[in-house]
Amino acid sequence: MMQVGILLPHNFRLLSIAAILDVFDTVNGFYTKDGQEAPFNINLITLGHHHYSFSTHPHLPLEDTGRLALILIPSFANPDIKDCIHANSEYLPWLTKQYTEGAEIATFCTGAFLLAASGLLNGKTATTHVDACAAFSTAFPLVHLKADKTVTQDGRLFTSGGATSTFHLLLHLLQLHCGKDMAVKVAKIFAIDMDRVNQSYFSTFQPLRHHNDELVASAQQKIENNYQDVATIEEMIKDIPSSRRNIVRRFKQVIGITPIEYLQQTRIEAAKKLLEQTAQQMTEVIYNSGYNDPKAFRKVFRKSVGMTPSQYRDKFQPK
């Protein structure tokens, strides 16, 4: 029987815990129904002696936990990830010790931040919620982030993207430890599409706005107000009292991307909304999002979103 520990950190997302428990309990149920030993012995690992009444599984304080084979880290409900890491810093040396002793560690959604804070992901491949990727890259530059991936595995370390990607990582773990037939059986029970490997099309461009650089804020506003018309950095900043070199440097420093990249992402986000919310012909969508070259638009859109504009419309426009 595999010893599994599910962390119950401060500020965990209940949906994440519920999904993990539901899948593992379902698998255990399949085995016991057939008269076999359940493959997973599940414990909920807490800081101190906190007890959460939503589960019948044993609750173990961190200091009472023995050696585990598999550790699962759920996502956080608090959007302030720095605060979440600080509140759960006691887990960090424990995770390192468990990994050194041979444990597999899997994170779901923003749970990757806690694992990354331990240093175990340095030089490793990982993913996280698609809209948290920019913050993750800034906080952990030594991690090889694959923002478009639904699931990653690098040795004994596993990560998944946002929300429903939890199920895809769980299926991956089940296939490793229980075989493909069980993974397929669970996929059918929970109605999970097993072929989704990309999460790029779920992303939303959410640029940083709460900063104190008025010059950068002015450039942001000009791009957002004129993205259909401007084409060069010079056009964007012609009325801003700063040199091109200075504004590009400050923009990249504050926002994390260049003004040209900001313009491109603004245009792609506009195109996505037109595809979701209107019946405009594709030529109108291209023009109204600031592009004149259909070929260039489709190339940039596919690279950014992970699918063609037509595929995106089919997926997200209400029928």
Image (cartoon, rainbow, N blue to C red):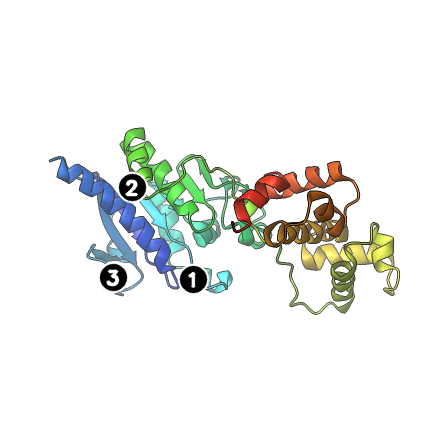
Tell me whether circle 2 and circle 3 mark residues in contact (CB < 8 Å).
no
Residue 305 percent across, percent down from the top left? 60, 43
Residue 291 percent across, percent down from the top left? 77, 46
In the rendered structure, the answer to whether residue 275 lies left or right of residue 96 reads: right
Can the viewer see residue 15?
yes
Can the viewer see residue 102?
no
Residue ID at (42%, 40%): 157
The quarter in which the N terminus is drawn is: top left
Is the residue 240 above or below the residue 130 in the image?
below
Q: CA distance from mark 1 to mark 3?
A: 17 Å
Residue kind at label 2, given as amino acid type: Ile
Which badge, 2 or 3, comes first in the chain's sequence? 3
Quadrant in the rendering for residue 44: bottom left
Residue kind at label 3, given as amino acid type: Phe
In the rendered structure, the answer to whether residue 190 lies left or right of residue 215 reads: left
SS for dot 2: helix
Q: Which residue is mark 2?
A: 189
Q: Residues within 10 Å of mark 2 (few under 14, many from 20)?
A: few
Q: Which residue is mark 1?
A: 77
Q: Residue 191 got which mark? A: none
In depth, the one of 34 and 219 nearer the eye is 34
